[in-house]
Image: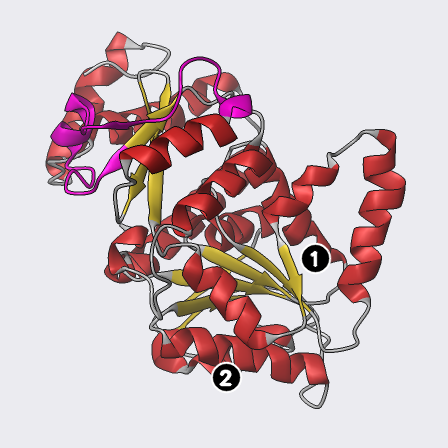
């Protein structure tokens, strides 16, 4: 078993270690992890670098273990300020959107501190709540709604915490907040704009009459888009609203027909709940020719790789040679596909598989 950056002398001991651990699956990836760790010893990495590596790996393992039993459940991450007080109208807004999505059997993922995080857990209820806590010297641990729950994980590093808050969810709601909230919102938008994360619904939620997200959009339009640093069409990546029902509909309706996507032999394959008609495919090809490098949009059968992986082979799919740049227009395409199906009250469980 060769490891990446091949060190043949490591192959036998790594194989023996995997055998001793009783590891039957994904041995190539695990061998790569172990090989990387072994090569750190020869790189002269200092103790602090090694401690960062070890802590990050431990934190990711703990989070993976906590989320694993709920892999088939759709999840929404809620971001917002830890400083929001329980009597603030924004707190009630966070609690209400969490409750609304939990009613549709979505799980709510957020930090485990006070403010918006506590509101999200309170609204969702313990059975539907996940907490990904960051250990800070000025906070007293997890809020009462998630404390001592097996779905609570503790993180030392913001980067591992952010990974779990983004990786595990199928939708996102962002409420007014400070540096941390804005950092999370911009990172999320960066991942979607660049295609480093799969398309997902993002809601910027404020109370009626609130100006927080209006001011944020004005800054983007007047100071960022006006300089050509982002595109005005990037607004397609999020919905700004002050209405809980509209926010919930944005999350739930995103998966009314769209399921997931995958690249196969250079083409973007989009899996759907319901196949478009021939007339709809022709209309899609005409409407979205600007994002097709060549050819049009057509119905396809599952590829051999998808069949081998058991990758939702029962679902209909379409494919196109996507330019991999205009992710705002890809979102428009998903919206159009969703318009072909009735809007459900809940999302199919399989979207999170």
> Does residue 148 appear anywhere in the picture?
yes
Q: Residue at the far bottom: name it.
A: 87
Image check: 166 left or right of 62?
Answer: right
Image check: 215 left or right of 256?
Answer: right
> Does residue 112 appear anywhere in the picture?
no
Image check: 70 left or right of 139?
Answer: left
Q: Are there few (<14), some (14-19), or many (20+) residues within 10 Å of tag 1?
A: some
Residue 66 spot, x, y in % from top left: 33, 61
Query: Magenta residues, as a range?
Result: 289-317
Note whether 34 is above or below 161 in the view shown.
Answer: above
What residue is shown at x 50% (from left), y 31% (from top)? Answer: 287
- Which image quadrant is residue 315 in? top left
Which of the labelled discs sits on residue 122, or is there none?
A: 2
Q: Secondary structure at mark 2?
A: helix
Alpha-carbon distance for marks 2 and 1?
Answer: 21 Å
Q: Are there few (<14), some (14-19), or many (20+) residues within 10 Å of tag 2?
A: many
- Residue for badge 1: 180
Which residue is nearer to you in this view: 304 or 156? 304
Q: Secondary structure at mark 1?
A: helix
Which residue is nearer to you in this view: 171 or 277? 277
What residue is shown at x 15% (from left), y 22% (from top)? Answer: 304
Q: Is residue 259 magenta?
A: no
Q: What scheme was used to colour the molecule? A: secondary structure
Which residue is nearer to you in this view: 46 or 294? 294
What residue is shown at x 51% (from left), y 36% (from top)? Answer: 330
Residue 276 spot, x, y in % from top left: 30, 40
- Which image quadrant is residue 181 in? bottom right
């Amino acid at each position: 078993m060769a490891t990446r950056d091949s060190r043949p002398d490591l192959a036998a001991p790594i194989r023996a270690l995997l055998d001793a651990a009783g590891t039957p699956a994904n041995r190539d990836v695990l061998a790569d992890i172990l090989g990387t760790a072994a090569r750190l010893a020869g790189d002269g990495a200092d103790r602090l670098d090694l401690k960062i590596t070890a802590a990050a790996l431990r934190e990711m393992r703990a989070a993976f273990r906590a989320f694993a039993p709920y892999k088939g459940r759709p999840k929404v991450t809620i971001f917002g300020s830890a400083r929001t007080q329980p009597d603030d109208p924004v707190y009630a807004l966070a609690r209400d959107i969490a409750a609304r999505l939990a009613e549709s059997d979505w799980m709510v993922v957020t930090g485990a501190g006070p403010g918006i995080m506590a509101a999200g857990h309170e609204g969702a209820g313990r059975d539907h709540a996940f907490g990904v806590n960051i250990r800070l010297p000025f906070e007293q641990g997890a809020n009462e709604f998630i404390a001592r729950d097996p779905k609570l994980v503790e993180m030392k590093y913001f980067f591992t915490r952010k990974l779990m808050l983004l990786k595990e969810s199928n939708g996102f709601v962002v409420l007014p907040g400070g540096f941390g909230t804005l950092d999370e919102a911009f990172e999320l938008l960066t991942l979607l704009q660049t295609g480093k994360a799969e398309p997902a619904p993002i809601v910027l939620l404020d109370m009626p009459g609130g100006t927080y997200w209006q001011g944020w959009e004005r800054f983007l339009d007047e100071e960022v888009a006006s300089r050509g640093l982002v595109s005005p069409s990037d607004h397609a990546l999020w919905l700004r609203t002050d209405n809980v029902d509209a926010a919930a509909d944005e999350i739930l309706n995103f998966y009314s027909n769209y399921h997931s996507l995958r690249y196969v032999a250079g083409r973007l394959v989009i899996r759907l709940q319901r196949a478009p008609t021939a007339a709809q495919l022709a209309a899609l090809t005409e409407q979205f020719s600007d994002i097709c490098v060549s050819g049009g949009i057509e119905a396809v059968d599952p590829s051999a790789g998808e069949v081998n992986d058991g990758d939702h082979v029962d679902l209909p799919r379409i494919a196109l040679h996507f330019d991999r740049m205009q992710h705002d227009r890809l979102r428009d395409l998903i919206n159009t596909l969703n318009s072909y199906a009735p809007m459900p009250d809940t999302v199919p469980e399989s979207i999170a598989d």
